[in-house]
Image (tube, rainbow, N blue to C red):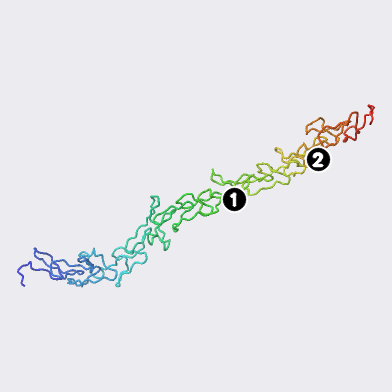
């Protein structure tokens, strides 16, 4: 049908108009490569790689020469897993030729056969020609086409946040995480579920490649939570178990004791010994001594000696009562039983080895090894000078008419009236008496 108005003119298929009614058409232009138009009119061309009426059919397609395409057949699919973001394709960025195709998110290594999916735990974002990469240090992998997320864990019962810490489950030397399960806690903390908990007392964590807290080793302890190390037991102490959580659990060695005020182990002074670990030292028993600190066993005094507190040297050893030293109170002198007629009380202040003392005059002892003067008794023919004389007083010879058998501390006994004894002094028995003829007496 013949037209009678310029307004009846329109663009052919494959072309779009530079004007539109009611203005007259100024001309039609061909659709550029990468676009088409399958109907006549002024409408714009449709671009390959875009969304049409909600349809994704043309996504990831491109167009080849020539221009002025009249069908969607102009649009050819890009190689596998390649294309372009449909939101950016259009007149300013048409899909013209195979070179317009780039790898999809999560793929790289573009080739005519298509792109290759990122390797394990690698990612690449958006359409493009870049290569797939592992996550940055301190970040966790999610999907090959998604961004990594920074590791971040909260602390149980505290405001501390543990950021960017990773223990890679494939290789602890790698700084990125295979997933958020590889996100870890600062040293001194351990992950439980999705929270960080401070290491308990008796435990520590100081290795960034070890996810767990470790028990304090032998001979150490830790009394604080959230620790990166343990405290060494004080000198001269140890622990019998790992995981100790107080200094009081450090056991002191034999010969030492715990000083709670100074919080350390001290060597016990001479005169004390510790036979067992972690048992308080005891004073040395009688007849033993020590001459140095931190002793674990006793040194014996020599035979016939006992020891005097504080028993802190050999000088504390002294002769037993009834024994004395013939050499006197000199170092190294030996103690021996006091012989008959002597006695020794034993130690006296400053005199550990006294000499044996002789009994008072005319006194002796019934045996050896006597310790007191009271054991000294009058010899036969001798008696106390007076009744109830002091035990330390000497005995005197019995006068004529008196006698004493000895062995007792009493005055000489009278033989009777008008008697004398022969010899005149020191009669030992009643049988030694006779009548005093000078008085005219005779035996009846």
The reply to whether residue 324 is visible in this rendering is no
Question: Quadrant of the rendered structure where residue 24 is?
Answer: bottom left
Q: Helix, strand, or loop for circle 1? A: loop
Q: What's the residue at 71%, 38% (across, down)?
A: 348
70 on left or right of 173: left
Q: Is residue 256 above or below residue 382?
A: below
CA–CA distance between discs 1 and 2? Answer: 51 Å
Q: Is residue 125 above or below residue 295?
A: below
**Dot label at residue 366:** 2
147 on left or right of 227: left
Q: Helix, strand, or loop for circle 2? A: loop
The reply to whether residue 374 is visible in this rendering is yes
**Dot label at residue 277:** 1
**Dot label at residue 344:** none
At which x and y percent is residue 270?
Answer: 63, 44
| Direction left: furthest residue | 4
At which x and y percent is residue 352?
Answer: 71, 41
């Amino acid at each position: 049908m013949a037209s009678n108005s310029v307004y009846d003119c329109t663009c052919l298929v494959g072309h779009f108009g530079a004007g539109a009614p009611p203005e007259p058409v100024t001309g039609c232009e061909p659709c550029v490569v990468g676009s088409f138009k399958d109907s006549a009119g002024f409408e714009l061309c449709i671009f390959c790689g875009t969304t049409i009426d909600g349809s994704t059919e043309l996504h990831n397609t491109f167009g080849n020469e020539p221009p002025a395409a009249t069908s969607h057949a102009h649009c050819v699919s890009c190689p596998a897993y390649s294309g372009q973001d449909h939101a950016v394709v259009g007149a300013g960025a048409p899909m013209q030729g195979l070179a317009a195709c780039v790898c999809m998110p999560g793929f790289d290594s573009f080739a005519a056969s298509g792109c290759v999916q990122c390797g394990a735990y690698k990612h690449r974002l958006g359409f493009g020609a870049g290569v797939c990469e592992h996550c940055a240090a301190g970040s966790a992998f999610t999907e090959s086409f998604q961004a990594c997320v920074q590791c971040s864990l909260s602390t149980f019962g505290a405001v501390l946040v543990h950021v960017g810490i990773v223990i890679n489950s494939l290789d602890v030397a790698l700084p990125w995480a295979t997933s958020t399960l590889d996100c870890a806690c600062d040293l001194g903390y351990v992950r439980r579920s999705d929270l960080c908990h401070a290491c308990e007392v008796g435990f520590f964590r100081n290795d960034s490649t070890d996810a767990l807290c470790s028990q304090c080793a032998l001979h150490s302890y830790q009394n604080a939570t959230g620790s990166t190390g343990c405290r060494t037991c004080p000198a001269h102490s140890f622990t019998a178990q790992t995981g100790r959580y107080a200094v009081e659990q450090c056991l002191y060695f034999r010969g030492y004791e715990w000083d709670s005020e100074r919080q350390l182990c001290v060597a016990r002074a001479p005169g004390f010994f510790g036979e067992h670990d972690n048992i308080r030292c005891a004073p040395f028993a009688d007849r033993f001594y020590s001459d140095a600190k931190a002793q674990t066993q006793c040194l014996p005094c020599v035979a016939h000696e006992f020891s005097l507190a504080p028993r802190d040297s050999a000088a504390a050893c002294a002769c037993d009562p009834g024994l004395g030293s013939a050499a006197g109170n000199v170092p190294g002198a030996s103690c021996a039983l006091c012989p008959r007629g002597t006695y020794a009380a034993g130690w006296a202040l400053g005199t550990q080895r006294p000499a044996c003392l002789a009994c008072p005059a005319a006194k002796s002892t019934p045996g050896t090894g006597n310790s007191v003067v009271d054991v000294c008794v009058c010899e036969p023919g001798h008696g106390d000078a007076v009744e109830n004389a002091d035990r330390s007083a000497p005995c005197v010879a019995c006068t004529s008419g008196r006698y004493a058998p000895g062995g007792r501390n009493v005055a000489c006994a009278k033989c009777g009236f008008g008697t004398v004894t022969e010899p005149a002094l020191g009669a030992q028995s009643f049988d030694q008496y006779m009548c005093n003829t000078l008085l005219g007496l005779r035996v009846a």
